[in-house]
Image (tube, rainbow, N blue to C red):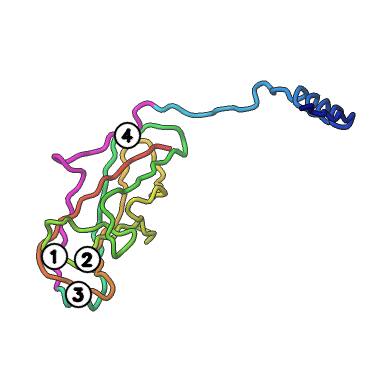
């Protein structure tokens, strides 16, 4: 059986143009630049015992919590000392923990808690909510010396759910990124 090959000058021209186009591409030297700033130890985080902070909410009536929707806001202060850095440097604080499945952005109470139907909210002093497990976190300006990083925390009742009385605990991790 004979096979016929059809030769067309157009195909040769197309192949030649493609070959020429691919050999015409050249790498451009030094077209990606990296910049950064290395700091010495930025700040020392003040730790009291094994924890950064322990927040003790006052006793709240489940009825009051269901009516108001949330408790009073309590201060949460992270203390940084001996901060040293260039003018205009900041710290970004992100909060990670078990998120409440019924309240996105809120910290869930631990499984061992007898109180149910609540979560823990966190916000900055200007009222900007800082959601759990959100990489945006909250950014604070730092000055050389000592700095207080201020948040507020509150108990939030789950909408449409009964609040079961009892004790509760909840834990989160605060991460500090100097930027």
Sequence-wise, which precedes: disc 4 or disc 2?
4
Q: Which residue is mark 2?
A: 118
Q: How many numbered discs, if any?
A: 4
Circles 3, 2 touching at the beta carbon (< 8 Å): no
Task: Give the SS element for disc 2.
Answer: strand
**Residue 19, labelled with which disc?**
none
Marks 2/1: CA distance? Answer: 8 Å
Marks 1/3: CA distance? Answer: 10 Å
Task: Give the SS element for disc 4.
Answer: loop
Q: Residues within 10 Å of mark 4 (few under 14, many from 20)?
A: many
List x then y, in percent, for residue 122.
30, 57
- The stretch of residues the image draws in magenta is 40-61
**Residue 162, labelled with which disc?**
3
The quarter of the picture where the C terminus appears is top left
Residue furthest to the front: 1
Circles 3, 4 touching at the beta carbon (< 8 Å): no
Compared to residue 70, the image places residue 105 above or below, namely above
Query: Which residue is more in the foreground, 70 or 2?
Result: 2
Q: Which residue is mark 4?
A: 43
Sequence-wise, which precedes: disc 4 or disc 1?
4
Q: Quadrant of residue 118?
A: bottom left
Marks 4/2: CA distance? Answer: 35 Å
Mark 3, mark 4: which one is toward the viewer? Answer: 3
Sequence-wise, which precedes: disc 3 or disc 2?
2
List x then y, in percent, for residue 140.
39, 46
Residue located 39% across and 37% down the image: 178
Q: Is residue 60 magenta?
A: yes
Q: Is residue 166 magenta?
A: no
**Residue 115, labelled with which disc?**
1
List x then y, in percent, for residue 28.
69, 23
């Amino acid at each position: 059986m004979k096979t016929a090959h059809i030769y067309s000058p157009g195909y040769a021209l197309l192949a030649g143009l493609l070959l020429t186009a691919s050999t015409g591409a050249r790498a451009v030297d030094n077209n990606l630049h990296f910049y950064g700033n290395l700091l010495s130890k930025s700040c020392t985080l003040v730790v009291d015992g094994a924890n950064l902070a322990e927040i003790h909410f006052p006793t709240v009536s489940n009825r009051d919590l269901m009516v108001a929707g949330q408790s009073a806001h309590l201060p949460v202060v992270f203390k940084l000392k001996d901060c040293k850095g260039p003018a205009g440097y900041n710290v970004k604080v992100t909060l990670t923990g078990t998120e409440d499945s019924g309240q996105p952005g809120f910290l869930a109470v631990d499984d061992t808690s007898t109180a149910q139907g609540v979560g823990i909210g966190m916000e900055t002093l200007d009222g900007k909510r800082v959601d759990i497990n959100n990489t945006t976190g909250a950014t604070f300006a730092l000055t050389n010396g000592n700095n207080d990083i201020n948040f507020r925390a509150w108990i939030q009742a789950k909408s449409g759910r009964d609040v079961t009385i009892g004790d509760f605990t909840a834990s989160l991790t605060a991460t500090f990124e100097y930027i």
